[in-house]
Amino acid sequence: MQTDPNPDQNAPAASLASYFPGVALAALIAFFSLIIKALKIPLLANLSPLMWAVMLGMVVRNTIGRPEIARRGLALCLRTPLRTGIVLLGLQVTLAEILGVGTFGLLTLVVALAATFWVTRVIGRRLGVAPGLATLIAAGTSVCGASAIVAANTVVGEDDEAVAYSLATVTLFGTVAMFLYPTIGALLPLDDAAYGLWIGGSVHEVAQVVAAGFAHGQASGQAATVAKLARVLMLAPLVLAMGFAARDPARRSRAPMPWFVFGFLGMALLAGTGLVSAEWRADANFLTQALLALALAAVGLETDLGKLVAQGWRPLALGACATLFIGAGTLAAALLWPR
């Protein structure tokens, strides 16, 4: 029998090929999640492609099953595409847009984010929710839903079931807010700017903010979108602060520093220079959604529903408390806005 004189020459190709099944499976699910959004089916389109990706992935994992051969590629999807997507997310925010919120609006958003993050973790301890899971729910509620959860998990390092539970919790209560807040807003003395500050400062996902904001009119929808983008920009300092806090010199093992958030900030600065056209920003937004959908499809494919159910009701109650806290706080600020 003839042997290969240079067996190591084929190793790189074989190694790369081992990633293909998992990446292809996650990409297929991400593709369908983007198609669902593009079809603009009523109600279904109100959920972001990111949430569809994780839900479809969970359906596949818990019905057909996840092939063992896909494991390595799925692990890759949870690293490079995730970080690249978060970096590109910075192109959707400019300093001029953030300043459009005004001093009072920015102060409201910063205080609401910090207070919600801290209070959610405190309530989580009282409820007996695992600290990592409570932190993910806190990040998703206080900043920007799914993107914040997956970014925060680069520091927290929770398993896929915890990520999936936090995603489901934040999406559930964000969806409730999306339908409920426009009705409440119609009964209150809120002008377009105040309503937009409330919606953009409290509803979780960008898609949910757009739906709830424009339900009150064009001007309120634009104000809500700007306020939400300001919250998105706060993702970078939050994750950096989490990274520094986790790197306790007294510990033998340290959480990795999320350096990719500097790329996020760099992209935000680039967007503010005017060098990036509106068309390029739109293309970058699509690529961002595709990359994050790829990562969240991998999360869904690695999520065992049995382990998810075992988490119990307490994390769900924590998500409800966090949503009520940030919703009530930003509403009070909007009603008291001195103008």
Image (cartoon, rainbow, N blue to C red):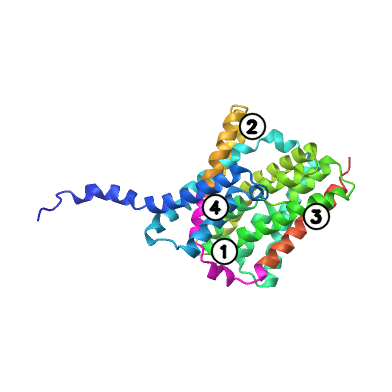
Residue 310 lies in what quarter of the image?
bottom right
Q: Going by the picture, which residue comes out furthest to the left?
A: 1
Image: magenta residue range: 294-315
Residue 56: image x %, image y %? 53, 56
Name the element at disc 2.
helix
Label 4 or label 3, whichever lies nearer to me, is 4
| Gap between marks 4 and 2 measured at Cα | 31 Å
Pick the residue in front: 46 or 188: 46
- In this rendering, the answer to whether 80 lies above or below 314 is above
Q: Mark 4 is on which residue type?
A: Ala
Residue 252 visible somewhere in the drawing: no
Label 2 or label 1, whichever lies nearer to me, is 1
* Quarter of the figure with the C terminus: top right
Q: Mark 3 is on which residue type?
A: Gly
The label on residue 272 is: 2
Pick the residue in front: 229 or 189: 189
N-term mark: 1 or 3: 1
| Gap between marks 4 and 1 measured at Cα | 16 Å
| Gap between marks 1 and 3 measured at Cα | 27 Å
Name the element at disc 1.
helix
Label 4 or label 1, whichever lies nearer to me, is 4
N-term mark: 2 or 3: 2
The label on residue 20 is: none
Label 1 Cα neighbours within 10 Å, binned few <14 / some 14-19 / many ≥20? many
Label 4 Cα neighbours within 10 Å, binned few <14 / some 14-19 / many ≥20? many
Residue 274 visible somewhere in the drawing: yes
The label on residue 329 is: 3
